[in-house]
Image (tube, helix red, strand yellow):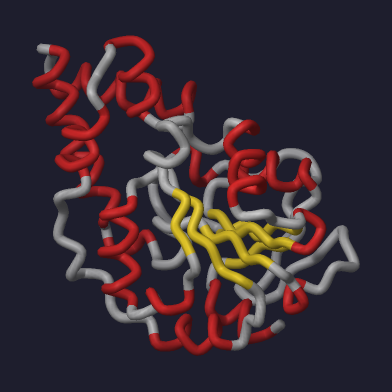
Amino acid sequence: MGNMSKTTATSKTPFNPLNAETWVFDLDNTLYSGVHGLFDQIDVRMRGYLAKFLGVSEDEAFRVQKSYFKQYGTTLRGMMINHRMDPRPYLDYVHDIDISAIPPAPELNRALERLDGRKLIFTNADMAHAERILNRLGITNHFDAVFDIVEAGYIPKPEPDIYDQLVGRFQINPRGAVMVEDIARNLAPAAALGMATVWIRPVTECDICKEAPEGAHVDFETDDLAAWLQAL
């Protein structure tokens, strides 16, 4: 898409996001910046949990963690399929992190207030983690529901069937919806359904997160969600 400022974006669709009936937001590294290091904490806890569960070194656990994330969409999914791991203790453990580094988000709060459409969270994390993050940001009141990994049957983005489930569960008209996400590949199924898509260019060291979108499934991109929403 070329070089763009943090609030300017190009679009392949005449759809104006400000007129959206439904907004679908990812959570981590989308509603807050990856610079605050939450995923560093989660990475460490994942590695430790997998090392103990598999009886391997932390280096080997790290390799498995990243390999499964790339192949299955989440490390958890790979562990469930290949090692019959119980997801609940894992989710509780890896999300037991210090979120105090995330500052409240008054600018994002004001930007969300401008949007008339319904707002949903669609996350590969769980409900408890989402509620903690939203409360910390001070934006809980804007969201009608959270569609988390548990409600999705532990099947993560970007599996297309989960997007169909999301649309059916909340009676979303895809042609009147916008999805916002930091992992570009997770926007492809949304675009295939007819949603407008916004890629939040990430600042994390995650290789998959930093992959530029391939194809035409990203309509807009920005590295400042609040500013982009305010500029609509």
The reply, left or right, for residue 131 in relation to residue 124 is left
- Residues 9 and 190: in front is 190
- Residues 36 and 31: in front is 31
Q: Is residue 108 visible?
A: yes
Q: x, y (%) of residue 161?
A: 62, 31
Q: x, y (%) of residue 132?
A: 26, 64
Rendered-image quadrant of the N terminus:
bottom right
Identity of the residue drawn at 40% across and 67% down = 32
7 vs 154: above or below = below
Asked where in the image residue 62 lies, by quadrant, the reply is top left
The reply, left or right, for residue 109 in relation to residue 45 is right
Q: Is residue 1 visible?
A: no
Identity of the residue drawn at 62% across and 41% down = 163
Q: x, y (%) of residue 6?
A: 60, 73
Q: Which residue is most to the right? A: 14
Q: How many marks?
A: 0
75 vs 163: above or below = above
Identity of the residue drawn at 66% across and 75% down = 117
111 vs 155: above or below = below
- Residues 189 and 4: in front is 189
Asked where in the image residue 160 lies, by quadrant, the reply is top right
Rendered-image quadrant of the C terminus:
bottom right
Q: x, y (%) of residue 156?
A: 48, 35
The reply, left or right, for residue 41 in relation to residue 217 is left
Identity of the residue drawn at 40% across and 56% down = 28
